[in-house]
Image (cartoon, rainbow, N blue to C red):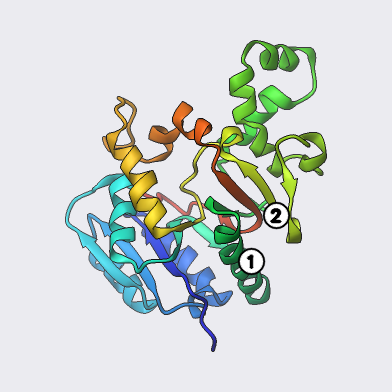
Amino acid sequence: MKYLKFSIGILSWKGYDSLYNSLKSYEQNGLNSLTKSKFLCLPEYSYRGIELAKKFSYKPILFKKNIGILNGFKSLALNMPDGPLLLLENDLTLVENYKITSTLLKQSLEHLYKYDAAQVRLRSIIDPGKPFHSVKKYNNYWGCGTLKKLKRLFRPNKAKKLIGTGIYIEKNPHLKFTKYISKLENNSYLISSEIMNWSNLAIMVDRNFFLKVIVKEAEITKGTKKINGFKNIEIELNKKWWQDKRWNLVITNGLFKHLRVDSRGY
């Protein structure tokens, strides 16, 4: 077995039914066999969480209390080796087989550094799962009708931030938005952060960039909106700073479906 040079990090606050469902899909479709470097962060852990880590050969990172999404992903990254990290939440099932998974991950590793990307997204375009809130927002601005044209006219910045989501909606997004979207091989796309917000959901990132830039910026960003009383990165980075950086983002055809089983925790 030839391993790929990346690490997997999963964050799971409770939500063990979702976690088991996801880990089982990784085992069945060969993701777990692509690397020995696998980590599972378990805030407010229980015996079941530890057993799941052991069953699927993930190194547990344990906290007695909830630490939130930002601190959870930060703790994962701090415990993982340098290089590319595949960061996942507990309700992301793998919907592609081993051949497709290994091929797309190899390509994602290449694209992460070739395009100096802030993140490579791996949520499935064909079967993204639910909820997918930005799709509804996209349709509210870029769907057909006079009202939606007026929304784009009076809220151009909001409309612009949603263009990237068109990759999940439009048949040929690179033809609809030629100025902003470039098509790469294997149905992947290259865009910039000016047209799509940061996402925590099924992403590949470089460890140093994630810790020194993304986590750092989220930590210093002030705001009142939180998830269970904690920062979550997505909220903190949804601002002009992110758009103005115009970092490259690679949107792949995807591997993971958002599928919650019972309560997922966060």
In this view, the residue in front, 218 or 13, is 218
- Residue designated by label 1: 107
Q: Residue at x 29, y 37 (%)?
A: 228
Q: Residue at x 48, y 64 (%)?
A: 21
The percent position of residue 42, horizontal first and vertical second, equals 28, 60
Q: Is residue 176 above or below residue 62?
A: above
Q: Quadrant of residue 246?
A: top right
Amino acid at the residue labelled 1: Gln
Give the total of numbered labels. 2
Q: Is residue 5 above or below residue 91?
A: below
The percent position of residue 49, horizontal first and vertical second, equals 30, 65
Amino acid at the residue labelled 2: Ser
Q: Residue at x 37, y 78 (%)?
A: 57
Relative side of 240 to 133, left or right: left
Q: Residue at x 45, y 58 (%)?
A: 206
Which is more N-terminal, label 2 or label 1?
1
SS at badge 1? helix
Give the label on residue 179, or none: none
The percent position of residue 250, horizontal first and vertical second, equals 61, 51
Which class describes the residues within 10 Å of circle 1: few (<14), some (14-19), or many (20+)? Answer: some
- Residue designated by label 2: 188
Quarter of the image with the C terminus in it: top left
SS at badge 2? loop
User: Disc 1 vs disc 2: Cβ atoms closer than 8 Å?
Assistant: yes
